[in-house]
Amino acid sequence: MMADRDIDKAWALVIDSNATSRSVMAAQLRDLGVGTVKQTARVNDARLMLEHKPYDIVLCDYHFEGTNLSGQDLLDELRRENLLPYSTVFVMVTGEATYAKVMEAAESALDCYLLKPYTADALRERLTEARRRKRVLKDVFDALERRDTDRALTLCVHRFSKREPYWHFCARVAAELLINANRPADARKIYQAVQRDRPTPWALLGMARSQYLSGEIPAAKRALEDLMVEQPQYTDAHDLMARIQIDQGDYSAALSTYRIAVGQTPGCLLRMQNCGTLAHYQGFQEEAVRLLDRTAAIGMRSKLFDPLSLMLLALIRFDMGDLKALAAAHELIKRYAERHASPDRLRRFDEATRALRALGSNDPDLAAATIRLMATEMEHEHFDLEAGTLIISLCSRMPQGSLAADEANELAHAVAMRFCVSKAVTEMLVSAAGRATSLVEVIRQGHAEITSLAEKAMNHSVRGEPRKAAEALLSKGAATRNAKLIEMAGAVVRRHREAIDDSEMLLEQASTLQQRYCQPHAHLAGLRRHGRSPGGLVLRA
């Protein structure tokens, strides 16, 4: 019996390590009328297949023999990185009928789950219902696909307010759209309404996210701490807590948080990368190697993989004196660069690894020349925090006397003056400097200089001279390319526009500098910065 009238056009993917179970599930889908059914036994292979082709139906086992990866890990990462179309129905098959597993399924926006053993009729009923839900909410999904967020928000708020079918899901989408529109207070009202109706972990987490985005950091942390006690397996809460800790420059606490998250989801590629990078910057090199090696082994062909992992492995291998492993890491970087287009970033990784290998071959002059070449880009717009961190990492490893007198300190000072916009960034650069105490002192001095420049400029505003404040901030911002000074200049002009005769000219100068030098950090503490806050529902809008 066909599940629905269009199922003959559907493509399905069956993911199960057991060949017999896989064949049975594939046969069941064909009996339901599914037009094309593909199979795979491995989670990593499934990830790649789903990254490169959309499927209408995914039937995935929860447990996989011989690996820490689970079907839940796969779904979490695909949802988190926006790699599943809204139209895809994802069905989890599990023999573990525990509350925690069912909760995980619900929280990850899973369409449905089946408990083993199940009948063909049960599969048909679940699949039919899930596909019906997709059809009922098609107008919402279509609006999101078109990036018509206003339309999607209107539809979701209507269904939520009228308590129409699937209003819980629509409430979650509406709240996410409001957060994306920088309206956390309005999103919080929806989360609170859901929580009053039927308490759910995602609504509790949503309230914490709203507090975080509103700048209510202590309240957000308290809410997260309570949630992690009540729902210790809810790892999205750990993701948000780690983000807050990183933003505050508390990398040690963030590492502890990610260790818990990795322990709960040992197959999650992104969390392994995050934990490995933090372990490296906190000096736990054996832990970092174990985690980063694993991410490279299982994830290099994945869109979720960050090649920074390879660069960090090269730095660690050099520090351990393992030149053979360093050469292997370099080969991986070159192979990755051949397959991916990111010329500036991957070229820097290649150059930095060449410098490390030159140092390993007792050729500090070649390493110094490479560092100087990389530093010539420091004034360019595409030179980012990661590039600055890399230069400091290399300088900290140069033998004494291999660079001209104070040259390493001058490079570190230039990087600090450009990128020290907060405690979090400063601590990032300090971590990169490692045990090179002179570089650490220079970086901290640079942060203090930026703070002092900002305070002196703002004193003009306090004395009723906002134009002088804006001019001072623009002058120092242009000289250092420091985003904090540039953004403060624009804020001063906008606030005192009426009192500044040529405010439009100053705003134009600030806007030009902002466009060139105030791009969001792609990485902080070596962690990729995503366009959504952790724990959020992934929307292509």
Image: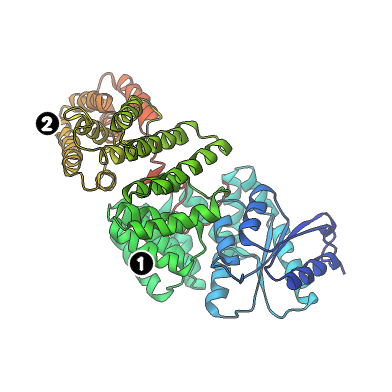
Question: Which mark, residue 223?
Answer: 1
Q: Quadrant of the N terminus?
A: bottom right
- Where is 515 relative to 82, above or below? above
Cα gap from disc 1 to disc 2, whole angstroms: 41 Å
Query: Which residue: 71% across, 81% down?
Result: 117
Q: Is residue 528 visible?
A: no
Q: Amino acid at mark 1?
A: Ala
Q: Quadrant of residue 35?
A: bottom right
Q: Nearer the viewer, residue 334 or 16?
A: 334
From the image, state whether disc 1 or disc 2 is nearer to you.
1
Image point (40%, 70%), residue name: 227
- Residue 434 position in % (x across, y down): 24, 47
Residue wearing tag 2: 463
Crowdedness near tag 1: few (<14), some (14–19) or many (≥20) residues, C-alpha within 10 Å: some
Q: Position of residue 391 (x, y in %)?
A: 31, 36
Crowding at label 2, few (<14), some or many (≥20) Cα neighbours within 10 Å?
A: few
Q: Position of residue 256 (x, y in %)?
A: 33, 64
